[in-house]
Amino acid sequence: MIKVKTFTSQLKIFYTMKELDELDRAVNEFIASGGIRKVVSVSDAVTTGEKGEAIGLVRVLAYEDPAAGERERHLEKLEARLKDWGEEIEKMRAKVDKLGSAAGARYRSQIEDLKVRQEAARKKLQELGRSGGEAWDDLKSGAETALEELKKGVEGAMAKLKKR
């Protein structure tokens, strides 16, 4: 996500160099303290007084939100968990297919239920991937809950299948 931060400095005759240095320092401190890794653009605009004289400077910094990378890593972890549980479902499906039709019927309905949960979790992760800002936190907890429900379902079904 791209964000924008604006800095301003009043310009006084004979002090312009010092004021520009202070403006540079403020921008650099913001970048360092915010953990910003990617600056998209920096632009300056001069503000003028009634007679057209330069009286100030506005510096606009466009940068990539450092939290965006953190979100992507978290989303990748959630997607990996979804993939792992999907593989477990497929392993169970293969075991159930080897059972007789009467014994396997009971487990097939559980597996279909797990596939429905898996698809719900996949949709939540897709929504999460498209979100940003405050919506991210709300959707993140929903996606994590859906994955946890899928995990419990898979583990429960695996335990029942092992007893057999």
Image (cartoon, rainbow, N blue to C red):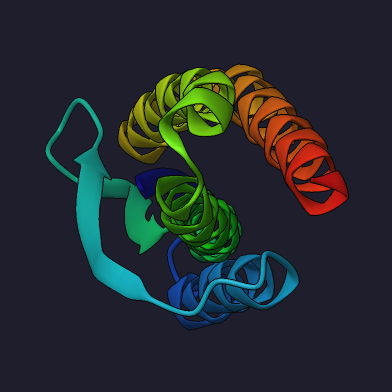
Q: Is residue 10 visible?
A: no
Residue 139 higher or lower than 77, as above or below = above
Image check: 30 left or right of 108? right
Residue 43 vs residue 94, the one in the foreground: 94
Residue 97 higher or lower than 156, as above or below = below
Image quadrant containing the C terminus: top right
Residue 146 higher or lower than 164, as above or below = above
User: Residue sitting at 65 percent across and 26 percent down?
Assistant: 137
User: Residue sitting at 42 percent across and 20 percent down?
Assistant: 116
Residue 45 is situated, as x and y percent measured from the top left of the image, at 20, 52
Image check: 89 left or right of 162? left
Image check: 152 left or right of 99? right
Residue 11 is situated, as x and y percent measured from the top left of the image, at 44, 56
Q: Is residue 164 visible?
A: yes
Residue 59 is situated, as x and y percent measured from the top left of the image, at 35, 56
Residue 148 vs residue 43, the one in the foreground: 148
Residue 53 vs residue 90, the one in the foreground: 90
Residue 4 is situated, as x and y percent measured from the top left of the image, at 38, 45
Q: Quadrant of residue 110?
A: top right
User: Residue sitting at 45 percent across and 48 percent down?
Assistant: 93
